[in-house]
Image: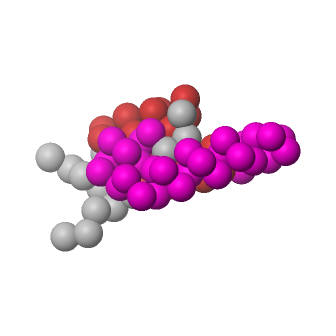
Amino acid sequence: MSTGQGSAGNVIAALCSFFIPGLGQLLQGRVLIALVMFVLAAVLWWFLLGWIIHLWSIIDAALFKPKR
């Protein structure tokens, strides 16, 4: 099973991050970065800048390559 960029797992993670920032990272087992993205997006949405973290979360989940 492919776990690299463009794999089904990364596509699902990116879709999850589309709905909730950090959820894709959480599905990939990266708890700390998931929490950081979720909190940053929540805080920055108060200033209408949360979309930056939201997009970062989606792209990060899609391009994630696990270390071997």
Describe the colour scheme in one phrase: secondary structure
User: Picture coordinates of residue 59 (x, y %)?
Assistant: 54, 51
Residue situated furthest bottom in the rendering: 68
Along the horizontal axis of the image, is 5 left or right of 20?
Answer: left
Question: Toward which corner of the image does residue 18 lie, by quadrant?
Answer: top right
User: Picture coordinates of residue 33 (x, y %)?
Assistant: 46, 57
Answer above or below: position of 46 versus 25.
Answer: above
Residue drawn where x is 64% and y is 51% of the image: 40
Q: Is residue 13 visible?
A: yes
| Residue 51 highlighted magenta (yes or no) | yes
User: Picture coordinates of residue 21 (x, y %)?
Assistant: 55, 41
Report the span colored magenta.
23-52
| Residue 49 highlighted magenta (yes or no) | yes
Answer above or below: position of 8 versus 66.
Answer: above
Q: Is residue 11 visible?
A: no
User: Picture coordinates of residue 47 (x, y %)?
Assistant: 85, 44
Question: Toward which corner of the image does residue 13 lie, by quadrant?
Answer: top left
Residue drawn where x is 55% and y is 29% of the image: 19
Instruction: Count the numbered circles shown.
Output: 0
| Front one among 57 and 2 | 57
Residue situated furthest top in the rendering: 19
* Quadrant position of the C terminus in the picture: bottom left
Along the horizontal axis of the image, is 68 left or right of 36?
Answer: left
| Front one among 23 and 63 | 23
The main secondary structure of the magenta stretch is helix
Residue drawn where x is 32% and y is 48% of the image: 28
